[in-house]
Amino acid sequence: MLRVRGTTYHFRRIVPPALRAALNRREIWVSLKTGYQNEARKRASLLHARTTELFSQTHLALSEPDALSRLEGLRVALRDLQSVNLPSSTQETGFVPVSAPMPKRRTVKKPAKAQSLMLSGALKRFVLDNPHASADTRKATQRAVDLFLQAFGDAPVSIIGGEKAGAFRDLLFSLPASLGKRKSSLTLEEEAQRAREEGLPTLSGKSVKNHMMRLSALWNQLHQRELVTRNPWTGWNFENGQKTIRRSWTARELALLASASWHSTSVPEQTFRLVTLIAAYSGMRLGEICALRKEDLQTVDGIPCFLIRLHPETGWTPKTEASTRMVPIHSKLIEVGVLALKDTTDGPYLIPGLETSKQGTRGAALGRAFSLLKTRIGLPAEITFHSFRHTVSTQLRNADANIREVWIDRLLGHEATHKSQGTTTYLTGIRTANLSQTIETISYPETAFKKIPF
């Protein structure tokens, strides 16, 4: 009776042999428009009752004088049945007998308090409409929920359990890593099939974990409010094959990047060279660099610094609480003219030549262009833009013994490595001169950045 096609259940019933000629059909297939087994069973039970009534009326029609006209009405009723939009079985009891033509069902609206909270409604109520949720949280949770809705459709949060969470996890692991980076009319099931057939790289364990964690965070709120009985998104394993460990740049790889030709039309080469230079001499994240505004370049205690902080006007927030920090500007960056950007760049942002995406992310195009470039010049998967941050961290930790670990943590925006009273209570008291001394230990070979951005 129940069949699964992709992620959706269907109702199937064989037409009795004696009635096949009269109804012009050997079997009945109807989409139940749900990916939830319990709900599908209830809807299938309703359809079974309707088709039983239809078969009974067909038997009677065959013995009547006006059988031909009567049978035509029943065939119309059968065609209507194939495309019927079944409501949830919780909204009905019994069935409506089939007639010719089949009567339209009355929709009985239930009181609002009796309606179940749907997943889409939970997303809007607890994330999208939450004034305390960051732009990153809204965007990432929206993406995770959208993928779930594409796969299984909307449903009450109270019936989404471990079975569906596991199915979603398995589906994510089978999707191509390029999902969302190009326009596609394929369903998620078709995307997964394409990835299998073409041997494409699939989503990493980290990406799958991020989607599941976003749903888990939403479910924690639902559980606290007793809207669900448990959180099915926790406790999963996300190891799926070989994990790519990001690492620092080598001198040869930096020289290769420096000599590579720039082919992107969406980001000027001068902007690309500038951003990579800042990343290499500061350890700042790509998003932090691209979000810098002119007022974020300030002199503190006589030392020019980048200020990484909340920007309420755009909704941009640092990644963590520790990420809100001050980074002294390396003398190499001052030498090439970074301080002049405050007076020469048009608009509110410090870095020129970047657009803000529809999702509100500034620098997304640069990140994509960098990924294409590194693939084109043959850099390994372990090297990403984030590798500049790894390189800075490695250099600082291998530097002179006078450089303290807490200074490094403060520069990079990490939680203090040692959770002593001194590092947790008095970390904000680190002198700007100490941070400047730390940043100045960063150095590279002459071949690393041959194409100066100015």
Image (cartoon, rainbow, N blue to C red):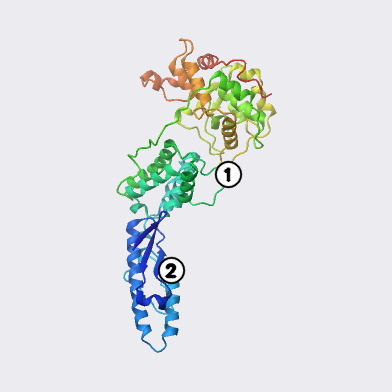
Image coordinates of residue 244 in percent, x first then y, are: 45, 30
- Identity, as a three-letter code, of the amino acid under mark 2: Gln
Residue 444 lies in quadrant = top right
Q: How far apart are marks 2 and 1 (CA)?
A: 40 Å
Q: Position of residue 289 (x, y in %)?
A: 57, 29
Location of residue 23 with respect to 266 vertically, above or below: below
**Residue 190 to residue 387: above or below:** below
The three-letter amino acid code for the residue at tag 1 is Lys
Disc 2 secondary structure class: helix
Q: Is mark 1 on a helix, strand or loop?
A: loop
- Quadrant in which the N terminus appears: bottom left
Please state which of residues 169 and 401 is positioned toward the viewer in this rendering.
Answer: 169
Task: Tell me which numbered mark, 2 or 1, is placed earlier along the sequence.
Answer: 2
Residue 386: horizontal and vertical position, in percent? 51, 28
Foreground: 105 or 108? 105
User: In which quadrant of the rendered image does the C terminus lie?
Assistant: top right
- Disc number at residue 82? 2
Depicted 96 relative to depicted 365: above or below: below
**Image height check: is 64 above or below 413?**
below
Q: Mark 1 points at which residue?
A: 358
Q: Label 2: few (<14), some or many (≥20) within 10 Å?
A: some
Decide if residue 92 is on the left or right side of residue 347: left
Residue 21: percent from left, percent from top: 41, 77
Query: From where the camera sits, is residue 97 visible?
Result: no
